[in-house]
Image (cartoon, rainbow, N blue to C red):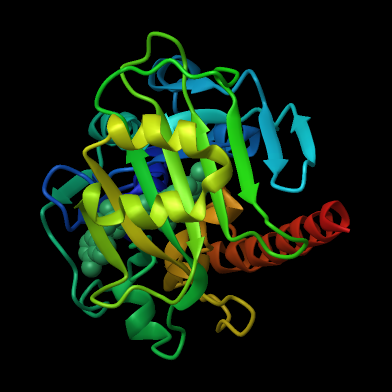
Amino acid sequence: MVTVIGGGIAGSALAGGLARRGLPVTLYERQSNGSGGGAFLFIDDRGHRALTELGVAQEAIDAASYPVTGGLAYANGLGRRGTTTGRGHRFWLRRNLIGMLGDFVADSGVKAEYGTGIADVDGFGDDLLVGADGIDSTVRARIEPERVTEYAGDVVLYGMTTVPVELPTAPATLHFFAEMPAPGPPVSTLGHIWRPGDPAALWFVRLPRPALTGGDDLGLRPIDEWAEDILAATPTNRALLETFLGATDAVHVSNARNVPLEDAAAPNDSVLLIGDADHAITPAAGVGARDALEDAHAVFQAVTTGSSPAAAMAERRQRILADRAQAQAAMRRSAG
Ligand SMILES: Cc1cc2nc3c(=O)[nH]c(=O)nc-3n(C[C@H](O)[C@H](O)[C@H](O)COP(=O)(O)OP(=O)(O)OC[C@H]3O[C@@H](n4cnc5c(N)ncnc54)[C@H](O)[C@@H]3O)c2cc1C
């Protein structure tokens, strides 16, 4: 018997995958209709491979997301430009990803307890307990109370227009612009994606600044509260920002945070953490959902083959740390 706490990305994928193999699985999700939340995500081919190997149909992925066919386009205020094809990235509205995973769980035989938040890790008997309860994990707080989130240095604002917009930039492309009045770290990063005929364009701004006070996640805030700060931090893209601000009612505002992984306690075979609960990383890295899906897949494989889920997660952590080191080295090379 497996108990999964948290029916977000990792927890739903794992619970649905295991139950489809005939294992008894109970899933507890605090929110009543599955995890919702605003914003949008980009997931690469590794994340999609994990999903299909867990049993999610390719047609379901295709129906709920679209490929970033224009690739990833980067520019900065010092005139540097570049485009990469990406690594099979697809664009997801978070609600579509969670909706697809909710259907996957619903069809699988999981005993799903939506609207049930878990406050403690005791009382689950001999079950394997998997904490997939996100960045502010209750499970992590119980088993590793000293491993707390850290501010990553940016406030992130995610917006979605309420009407279709036509933009001068290439469609189906993830655009980044680093506002850089002088060599050094950017004073803001603007990202956006759109397609002709889509009901909304999606954009985000990352502002390096002191952390928000009043909570790490302010949720959706009226655009007027942030418009001035956004415009002040993005002078090179004034016209684009004016289009976004004029067509957006509210932005999702939160502190970018990490869950430190380097000194984590070794996983064990009775209580495990996966996804953000174990190793959340700032949205700027763009890999948290991919990593969460790969964790779910690794634990799924261990459980279904009778090997140790703890060993699988220990291996996952090594891979994640190696990926991060590689990404940082690539960033240093492109900055130098
Ligand atoms: C603004 C933003 C943009 C991002 N963009 C990207 C991107 O482009 N690409 C990418 O790969 N990643 C991105 N990420 C990261 C990605 O969203 C996370 O890594 C991913 O959601 C982690 O999945 P998870 O299942 O571990 O946690 P979550 O998806 O957060 O799910 C955790 C679930 O646990 C539930 N829960 C919490 N506590 C309890 C409890 N006590 N009992 C029961 N249920 C509980 C919550 O309600 C939630 O449903 C972004 C993150 C943010 C904030």
Q: What residue is drawn where x is 55% and y is 20%?
A: 172
The answer to which of 313 and 117 lies nearer the viewer is: 117
Question: Residue 152: image x %, image y %?
Answer: 52, 71
* Residue 220 higher or lower than 320, as above or below: above
The quadrant in which the C terminus is found is: bottom right
* Residue 332 higher or lower than 122, as above or below: above
The answer to which of 72 and 297 lies nearer the viewer is: 72
Q: What residue is drawn where x is 34% and y is 73%?
A: 212
The answer to which of 72 and 281 lies nearer the viewer is: 72
Q: What residue is drawn where x is 28% and y is 29%?
A: 247
Return the residue found at the far bottom: 146
* Residue 95 higher or lower than 288, as above or below: above
The quadrant in which the N terminus is found is: bottom left
* Residue 76 higher or lower than 211, as above or below: above
Side of 215 relative to 146 (left or right): left
Question: Residue 161: image x %, image y %?
Answer: 30, 30
Q: Which image quadrant shows ligand 1? A: bottom left
Question: Residue 76: image x %, image y %?
Answer: 70, 45
**Residue 303 appears in view:** no
Count of residue discs: 0
Q: What residue is drawn where x is 52% and y is 61%?
A: 282
Q: In the rendered image, which quarter is residue 216 located in?
A: bottom left
Return the residue found at the far top: 197
Question: Residue 23: image x %, image y %?
Answer: 36, 45
Q: In the rendered image, which quarter is residue 140 located in?
A: bottom left
Side of 93 relative to 53 (left or right): left
**Residue 174 appears in view:** yes
